[in-house]
Each structure stands twice: as C-alpha cells, then as structure tokens.
Image (cartoon, rainbow, N blue to C red):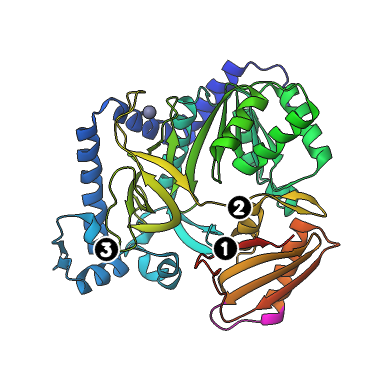
Amino acid sequence: MIQGISNRLRHNLWRGAVTLTEDRFNKYQKLKSWEELNAEEVENYQHQLLESVLTEAVTNVPYYRDTFRTNGLAVDGELTLDSIDKLPVLTKSDLQENFDRLKHDSIERFSWYVNRSGGSTGEPTKFIQCESYQYWSYAIATYLNERAYYRDGYPRVKLWGSERDVFDVDQSLRSKIGSFLRNETVLDAFTISDSDLDRYVRTINETQPVQIYTYVDAIHELSKHIARNDVSVHSPKSIMTTGGTLHPHIRSEIHDAFETEVFNRYGCREAGDIACECSAHDGLHVTAPFNYVEIVDEDGNPVEEREEGRILVTTLRNPAMPLIRYDTGDIGVKGGTDCSCGLAWPKIQRVSGRASDMIETSNGVVSPISFIHGIGVVLEDDSIEQYQVIQKETNEFIIKATHRGELNKSQLEEEIEKMIKQIVGTDTFVEVQLVDEIPPDPSGKYRYLKSEV
Ligand SMILES: [Zn+2]
C-alpha cells in the first residue's frame, strides 16, 4: 500500500475514519472531561451512572429483577439499597446459566454482538456487548495509550494473540485497513520460537514503534532473549503490558532490555480495560467513566485500602447485558485516589494471581493465554463448563473438561484435540478427558493450566 505516508497524516486519517464512522470521538471527549474532576466529583458521577445502570437492570433485565426482589433489595421495581455492596455477586457460572435472562427486555433497541472469553479461571464465558460499548472501549484504549505517550496512527507493534497465524482465521478487509491506518504491526504472542524472537527484534528495529502493546509473558520472553544475546533493539516511548501479572522483577527485565517505561494495564474481555497505570507507576487507575470496581473479601464486603481481595466489576456502558458486581476471578489490592499524576480516578494498587508462565512445547514457547483464547473463543462451544490443561511431558498434554447439556462427546473431544494441537504442535500427544469434576489443587486453588515438566 502507500509507502512513506507521514505518521501525522495517518493519525489524522485514522481520526477522520473514526469520527465519520463511529461516535467514538465524542465518547473520547466525554471521558476526557472526567480528567478534570476531583475525587469527590468522580465518585458522584460514578454513583449517578451506577444508579441508572441498577435502575435499568431492576426494571428491564429479568435476572436482576428476580434476584434483587428475592433478596429484598427491590420493591415494585424500586431499589431499596443504600449501597451496591448489598447486591449479590455475579459469578461466571451465573452468567453462563442465566445468559438469556441477563439480556435486556428490549434488546432489539440496541445494536449488539456476542463475545466470548476463555476466562483466566478456566471457565469459558459467553456474553453480549453493545456496539456503543465497543466505541467506549476504543475511546478508553485511545485515552490510556495517550497517557503512555502514544497517539493513534503512529507506529506501534502489537505482540498479541495472532489468531490468523495460530488458528487460520482470515483477517477482514476492514480490519486490514484499520491496521494500516493505525500503523500497527502484529506479531504472534501465542507461540514463540527462537527464530521468531530474532525476527521480532528485526521488525521492532525496522518499524521503530512509539509503543509496544503486549502480553506480559511474551515481552518477558523477548526481553530475556535480548539480554541473553546482547542484541541491540529500538527503544519505544512506552511498553504497555496486559494479560498477566507484571511482577517487579519482570518489569525491571523488560525495562532493562528496552530502556523505556513499562505500563501495566488490566482488563478482561467481559469488561474491557478495567484499570491502567499512569506515569507515576504507583498503582493502576480504574477506568472510572467506563467501569465501577470493588475489591471485596470472601463474603463480598469491601476491603480497606491496601488490603487484598477479589476484583468485582460493574460495567457502566453496556445496557444490553449489564454485568453487575461481576467476579473477574482476579485478586487485587485496593489503592487510594491520590496520585502525583493529578488524575483522581480510584486506584487498584496491584493486580495479582493472573495467568501463569509461558510453557515449552514442540512448537516453541506457548503463552497460557492461547489456551484460554483457543478453548473459550475460537472453539465457540457452549457446552464446556470448565477445563484444565495439564502438560505431562514437553509433547504430551491431557485436557480435562467438564460439560453441560446434551452433546456429542466424541465430536467435542475431537474438536478440542484439533484446537490444542494447533497451539502445541501436531506431533504432540493430546488426550481429551470429559469428566464430571475437576478437583482443585491441595491448596484449594483451581488452575486452568498445569505444567508437570
Ligand atoms: Zn496517576
């Protein structure tokens, strides 16, 4: 395509395309106006949004109408609670079992689509998102990137789950044009061999990205490779990591390899970007105009600042299927609202307990996210309730899965086996076991991926 087009022009074309086709830009401006608010104002605005989400839910969403009424929290469609933490938590199984009842009564009013997640807890999940939610989500991403010195249209490398490489998924023309205008180069983060690492360094040096957007484990592999081989690599203005725990030692290895600032972003497919670090690197600001976040103890009660608990999220911009107090399955530490960057959006001090390390296979090292994505998103099978991937040897895998409803067992086994082989290599032995129960570890913790190698 067109060579030599300036980054600035590409940025403007991208902005133009966005403004013409979507109201994403308006949403961006709306959320930008939240930047000026103080902590009290942020809280007030969030409460206003929450109130309207809850009122709409109790009036128009059968699942909430029933649960809120059964729990004595709503009378004649009016909420009687003084605080959101009185409401029941919505688990991944609640979401799966009540998919139809979680739809808005007048869902035809919205433009919507079905989205899926493999779930970092090994439970594949299906949910509905509004098109307008997606525009919010784009706007949030643009905003967060700008705070990490990146503007749409400037060169960027995405070290990402490249579905079309791993799962033979065709990229649409629209997404190709989008990638071109966005000036984005996508490298596969699911399966990485040694020769890939050399190629990735070359691509980064050639494209000179302003930002690298990446899974934690993939950029960590690349950073170790750079340090090990003393390779010279272009230093972007920022590296934005997501999809894993950014432990301090990992952050410093990435920082040392690329000599740049490393930002930590936290999100999930069900709720989009939930929180992101700012240049102060002292906790992650919750995306306040988009999501409401609570950190709670085992009984669903709020924890104190600096205490650890489960992360619950309430989506504020997805009326077709609002998720209220949705249990992400992740653990985080509650932060304060003061920040030297000046933004008064509340903070999660730290997110822990996310995805495990890369694993060695005959295909190279493989990201744990590829299993989540493969089973939850690519497979598109609603009958899998929970799964666990166990690596016995480098080239031997056992996949356990519990299932619901009537199904053709041998067909499901075959499909899972085929999908797993695409990730770990076709010469690998893969055994699928459909079981009644997957027991947790002796510690009581459930792991979706276990490597015994
Ligand atoms: Zn800040």
Residue 274 inside the magenta-drawn segment = no
Magenta highlight range: 403-410
- Residue at disc 2, secondary structure: loop
Disc 2 target residue: 356
Disc 1 target residue: 447
Left or right: 433 as drawn, with respect to 91: right
Q: Quadrant of residue 405?
A: bottom right
In this orientation, which residue lies closer to the viewer: 137 or 235? 235
Residue 406 inside the magenta-drawn segment = yes
Q: Quadrant of residue 9?
A: top right
Image point 66% across, 82% down: which residue?
408
Residue 198 screen position, x and y as percent: 81, 33
Q: Main secondary structure of the magenta part?
A: loop
What amino acid is found at the position of numbered circle 2 in the picture?
Ser
Residue 372 screen position, x and y as percent: 60, 58
Badges 2 and 1: C-beta atoms under 8 Å apart?
yes
In this orientation, which residue lies closer to the viewer: 61 or 246? 246
Left or right: 338 as drawn, with respect to 364: left
Mark 3 neighbour class, 10 Å CA radius: few under 14, some 14 to 19, many 20 or more: many
Image point 57% across, 82% down: which residue?
436
